[in-house]
Image (cartoon, grey):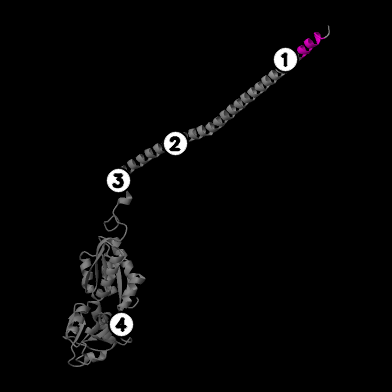
Amino acid sequence: MARPWAPTRWAAARWAAARWASSRRASARWAAARWASSRRASARWAAAGWASSRCASRRTPTRSAAAGWASSRRASRRAQARWAQAAAGLAAVAVLLAGCGSASPAAQPAAGGSTATGPHGTITVLAAASLTEAFTRLGNQFQALYPGTTVRFDFGPSSGLAQQIINGAPADVFAPASPTNMNQVVSAGDAANPVTFARNVLEVAVPPDDPAHITALADLVRPGVKVAVCAPQVPCGALAVKVLAAAKLSVHPVTEGTDVKSVLTVVRTGEVDAGLVYVTDVRSAGRAVLGIPIPATVNSATTYPIAAVSRSGNLTTAQAFVAYVTSPTGQQVLTADGFANP
């Protein structure tokens, strides 16, 4: 009776064991699948959250910077608008001032009838004939120094030039060969504050071949010697009178020149045997004449003053020329031509 039971119990045991193993495997698979699913969901959730936070963090500064840039652009445009309004206002003021220029002190003509502030335009200089070479050179240098200026000269006897100025002749600068002639113009109210800029002395001039064999001042009184001097009313003539008186010589000239250049001319052409002229004229003549010095014990000097003419139509340039003549540069030119310092 026992055998039928044994197989049955054994089969039941096997069946129970198989079912338990099957359920354990199913439970394990189910648990593993659920765990994997939960891990994947967690990973997806974490990744989504990280990406979202990165995007947000990146968008935030960018949006902020963009907003700041836009704000600065708006501020810049507002500033530009304000500057444009200010510029328009200034332009309007400038137009108004230009229209009222005649009432502005800055627009008033400067002394001499011009609105320019520096040397400009044309001036006329009345100067002693003995200044011809030196002043011509100074005039050229002055024009080069001040482009746009023109210096015109009228050289002649100082006494005649002074009278022209007093009589109203157009002139901007006066430079005679004697203080006497300058004093005449100053006394007439036509000049003021003259400045002495040079000094000159006399010398005997003879032709290059010296036909009369003149070697000294005393030879001028020899019989048959033809002598030329300046007229006594002009500086070189007044100086000749003084020199001959100091040397105690009585000379009877055959001609009296209107200025020193006219005396030099008759010496160069051989019309006379000798003439009393300035040292500077002998030098400027070069080889055309010979110079015989006069002893300092009897020689005399004349001084040269210069001044702007009061009624000059171009007082600014006239004063600039006076300043140039008396400057170190002007003195160098005068010294090179034989003038002595005042």
Residue denoted by label 1: 19
Q: Out of 111 and 59, give the one closest to the viewer.
A: 59
User: Pointer 3 and pointer 2: residues touching (CB < 8 Å)?
Assistant: no
User: Pointer 1 and pointer 4: residues touching (CB < 8 Å)?
Assistant: no
Measure how far apart labels 1 and 4 are at the Cα level.
160 Å
> Which quadrant of the figure has residue 245?
bottom left
Instruction: Return the mark for residue 300.
Output: 4
Q: Out of 207 and 32, give the one closest to the viewer.
A: 32
Q: Earlier in the sequence, mark 1 or mark 2?
A: 1
Q: Nearer the viewer, mark 3 or mark 4?
A: 3
Measure how far apart labels 2 and 4 are at the Cα level.
87 Å
Q: Earlier in the sequence, mark 3 or mark 1?
A: 1
Which element carries disc 1, helix, strand or loop? helix
Residue denoted by label 3: 98
Which element carries disc 4, helix, strand or loop? loop
Q: Earlier in the sequence, mark 1 or mark 4?
A: 1
Instruction: Return the mark for residue 232.
Output: none
Residue denoted by label 2: 73
Q: Amino acid at mark 1?
A: Arg
Relative placement, left or right, of 337 versus 10 is left
Q: Nearer the viewer, mark 1 or mark 2?
A: 1
> Looking at the image, which residue is at 76% across and 11% down?
12
Which element carries disc 2, helix, strand or loop? helix
Magenta-highlighted residues: 3-13
In this view, 14 is above or below 260 = above
